Image: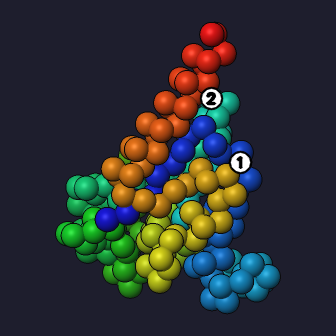
Amino acid sequence: MPEIFVRLDRCVGCRSCEMACATEHSAGKSLISAASEHPRPRKRLYVEMAEGTKLPMVCRHCEDAPCASVCRTGAMTQDPETHIVTRDAEKCIGCWMCAMVCPYGVVGRTAEGRVALKCDRCPDLDVPACVAACPTHTLVFMEAEDFSELLRVDAAARLARGYRSRA
């Protein structure tokens, strides 16, 4: 099952991922129409500055998701096969237990009420909107093994460049 991975060295903080996320979750699915919708569409990931580095923070859909485990109404549920955590707005009572236990701080709230809001990994798309919009390929959507290989190849290339520059 593909996951969203973050290439930590690539984010420039453009927030294209945030805009694409909000637009995908808007009624009109268009940036132009989303800007005038009420309530305004909300993003489900956050680009944060941490120790001089910009980092996209997105739901990891943890294997044993604490947000789903603590949800007393069953609003947050986790698919046993894909591990994708979804939320049912009708069941959410806004107790914020999910937000309190999320280790990444990526559970937000809707603008119109006390309902939790989080990444649903864009179930109607082949590639999540945030990933497709990222101009620097900071966000990638792939299998864990493929991501590890990508990192190894990048690391090997950096090592080779360093070795050649000393020779």
In the rendered structure, which amino acid carries the disc numbered 1? Gly
Q: Residue at x 51, y 48 (%)?
A: 6
154 vs 46, nearest the viewer = 154
Q: Residue at x 71, y 83 (%)?
A: 30
For discs 1 and 2, the disc positioned in front in the rendered view = 1
Q: Is residue 88 left or right of residue 116?
A: left
Q: Residue at x 62, y 29 (%)?
A: 51
Q: Seen from this angle, which residue lies furthest top? A: 166
Residue 157: image x %, image y %?
55, 32
Q: Seen from this angle, which residue lies furthest front? A: 167
Q: Is residue 148 left or right of residue 113?
A: left
Q: Which mark is residue 51?
A: 2
Secondary structure under the numbered disc 2 in the rendered image: loop
Neighbour class for label 2 at 10 Å: few (<14), some, many (≥20)?
Answer: few
Residue 13 to residue 160: above or below:
below
Neighbour class for label 1 at 10 Å: few (<14), some, many (≥20)?
Answer: some
Q: Which mark is residue 125?
A: none
Residue 88 visible: yes
Q: Is residue 144 left or right of residue 72?
A: right
Residue 76: image x %, image y %?
32, 70
23 vs 116, nearest the viewer = 23
In the rendered structure, which amino acid carries the disc numbered 2? Glu
Secondary structure under the numbered disc 1 in the rendered image: loop
Which colouring convention does the figure follow? Answer: rainbow
- Disc 1 to disc 2, how far (Cα)? 14 Å
Q: Seen from this angle, which residue lies furthest bottom? A: 28
Q: Which residue is mark 1?
A: 13
Mark before the other along the chain sequence, 1 or 2: 1
Badge 1 vs badge 2, beta-carbon distance below 8 Å: no
In the rendered image, which quarter is residue 86 located in?
bottom left
Residue 78: image x %, image y %?
27, 69
